[in-house]
Image (cartoon, rainbow, N blue to C red):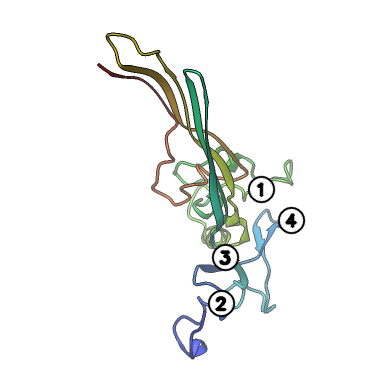
Amino acid sequence: MSFPDLEGSTYTNKYVIGYPISIQKLYNYEGIGPETGLYTFTDYNEDGRISSPEDNRVIKKIGIKYFGGWSNQLAYKQWQFSFLLQFVNQEQWNYNSQMLTPGSMNNQPVEVLNVWSEDNPNGEYMPYTSGANSEKNRLQTYFRNSTAAVGDVSFIRLKNVQLSYRLPVNTYIRDMQFYVQGQNLLTFTNYFGIDPEFTLRGFLPPLRTWSFGIQFNF
């Protein structure tokens, strides 16, 4: 990217020369403090507090790196089989980017039950809060905009499969075919979230469906 006088513009904290415009500047998440149970982040300018733009310095390229697919069709006598595999290599926001402060009255994934405590020092999330807690709310905001909220969202998906059988031609029916078809049957991914194809809030994942049918001509 080329941007004359970027340092003097309002975009100086958003864009970086030489990087695509899809980048995100993130806080570097270091984990949960073993003594406090609170999220910790790298204090790059060592001023004793986490702030922007001083401390959100990690640059992540959000988006698809490459994608593709493989389709094939096999036939044997009256039988026919076809499929479509889709693959995407990408880095995107994961479910941590959408989480509210643990203990909030909102739908949450089951993973939030793995909270830090003296009995569970390896817990992944801050302890719950029963009321407004400004410090935890602030740390949760940093967490949602940190390296913990972005990751590898690559996936391989079996998008379509169809198996059909065509009856031999006879006097009454010129062509008849029975088929069964499946959509979005299998997905292989390490993504932490609802669906790697739709990572933004407010979108339902593609449905897994089966359909059966008959096609014929007289």
Q: Mark 1: few, some, or many residues within 10 Å (few <14, many ≥20)?
A: some
The residue where tag 3 is placed is: 61
Secondary structure beneath label 3: strand
* Count of residue discs: 4
Q: Position of residue 183 (x, y in %)?
A: 45, 32
What SS does tag 2 mark?
loop
The residue wearing badge 2 is 53
Q: Residues within 10 Å of mark 3 (few under 14, many from 20)?
A: some
Mark 3 or mark 4, which is nearer the start of the sequence? 4
Distance from Cα at disc 2 to Cα at disc 4 = 27 Å
Marks 2 and 1, the one that precedes in the sequence? 2
- In the rendered structure, find residue 124 and report the number of the disc placed on it: 1
Q: Please, what secondary structure does the residue beneath circle 1 have?
A: loop
In the rendered view, tell whether residue 4 sits above or below residue 205: below
| Vertical comparison of 46 with 104: above or below | below
Describe residue 97's horizontal placement relative to residue 30 as left or right.
Answer: left
Q: Residue furthest left?
A: 218
Q: Earlier in the sequence, mark 3 or mark 2?
A: 2
**What amino acid is at disc 3?**
Lys
Dot placed on the residue nearer the N-terminal end, 1 or 3: 3
Q: Are marks 4 and 1 in contact (CB under 8 Å)?
A: no
Q: Residue furthest top?
A: 171
Query: Dot 4, crowdedness within 10 Å: few (<14), some or many (≥20)?
Result: few
Residue name at image x 34 percent, y 16 percent: 176
